[in-house]
Image: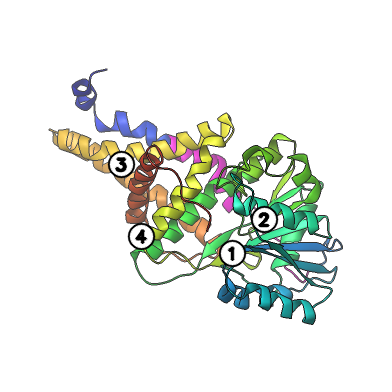
Amino acid sequence: MALPVLLSLPPCLLLLPLLLVQLWFWGRYFRPFTRRPAELPAEAPGPDDEPVSIMLCAHNELENLRELIPLLLRQDYPAGFELVLIDDRSQDDTYLYAQQLAQYYPTRFRLVTVTHTPAGFSPKKYALTLGIKSARHERLLFTDADCRPTGPDWLRLMQRGFSQKNGADMVLGFSGYAEQPGLLNQLIRYETLLTAAQYLGLAWAGQPYMGVGRNLAYTRATFQSTKGFASHIRRLSGDDDLLVQDAVAQGARVAVVADPLAQTLSVPATTWAAWWRQKRRHLSAGSRYQPADRRRLAFFMGSNALFYLLSPVLLAAATTPKNLLSLGLIWLARTLWLFAAYLPLARRLGQHLPAVAIPLLDFLYFVLYCAWGSSLLFRRPLQWK
């Protein structure tokens, strides 16, 4: 159909189908996850009888490690756990700090040192592989050096996810970003919320497709069933989402734990350039998702992006008050949908975003999303540190 003919149609005939796609996702995935039963409190009796290996990979992260490791070692988990620090080619004093910890906590802390990475391998995936091989326990819980658990019950609550699904093999958690002043921080936290709505909502509905390595647990058997990171060892990103893809393909049962006390919190990027690089790296793994996952995500993300791309064109082409009214009503309906979809989810996840800013943040995010996607066609992703 020629563009002039399309523009002659009432705006509702072009924008309403896009809005209906978004409403369908809300009803099918977002709303059920938001209204899921509350998790049991940490003090309630639970299946906490399996020891755990907390896996932490770091490259030149001494200052972060000085803050994070004491919080990890103070986790309240009577069944016992070890902390495995994987020092990935650090050139700061990480090794000396780790040696001190090993003396103070000889049974709870262990160090794995990586001095070089084979040519062509993802450094982080190679380092994680060595760490997992050295772990003593079957259950593995992962986080990053720039994260902080939201409390001493983080480990206990995440491990309870393994009792879901009649014995889950993998547990997806939520990892947010610290609240700071400024538009960039609000946009980062909004994008994190929107991403969580997708991967946690779909996983809750039985269609898991990704997780975040800042708060992710799985068993050693699950890692072995995928042959580790073998299918994507040469790709920079994907130590979390591509592993979830491979594990699901092998029949892994995936659970979700999103209690505010079972989360981790990270320090967000403080410059637009740093966030741009981070998002390009994360999005680069999407091309390896299963076709069904790519289609679902394309429908949702595409319907949002196309809504914004078409709206100014339709506004410029609107020649009658009736067309302007229909365009305004569609925009009003979508704005109300944004509030209905994301404000309850933010409350359940313990996130704080100003309601009046959500329409602007949503618009900015999808403009940037189109830019990120376009940039991946012309430039290679950045490398691990």
Give the label, 1 or 4, closer to the camera: 1
Q: Earlier in the sequence, mark 2 or mark 4?
A: 2
Crowdedness near tag 2: few (<14), some (14–19) or many (≥20) residues, C-alpha within 10 Å: many
In the rendered view, tell whether residue 80 sits above or below residue 307.
below
**For the residue carrying disc 4, how many other residues have a C-alpha within 10 Å: few (<14), some (14-19), or many (20+)?**
few
Q: CA distance from mark 3 to mark 1?
A: 40 Å
Which disc, if any, is residue 272?
A: 4
Foreground residue among 85 and 38: 85
How far from the left and from the top, in percent, is residue 224?
78, 44
Q: Secondary structure at mark 1?
A: loop
Asked if residue 25 lies in the magenta stretch, the reply is yes
**First in residue order: circle 1 vs circle 2:** 1
Residue 18 lies in quadrant: top left
Which element type, helix, strand or loop, lies under badge 4? helix
Q: Is residue 4 above or below residue 48?
A: above
Amino acid type at image mark 1: His
184 relative to 229 in the view: left or right: left
What span is in magenta?
21-44
Instruction: Give how far apart the Cα atoms at labels 1 and 4 are.
Output: 23 Å
Please name the residue that numbered disc 1 is placed on.
59
Res 308 label: 3
Please check the rendered image and state whether residue 79 is part of the magenta-colored stretch, yes or no.
Answer: no
Q: Which mark is residue 127?
A: 2
* Marked residue nearer the N-terminal end (1 or 4): 1
Do the numbered discs 2 and 4 sit on residues whose CB atoms are within 8 Å? no
Labels 3, 1: front one: 1
Mark 3 or 1, nearer chain start: 1
Image point 73% across, 77% down: which residue? 99
In what element is the residue under mark 2? Answer: helix
Q: Position of residue 186 (x, y in %)?
A: 40, 63
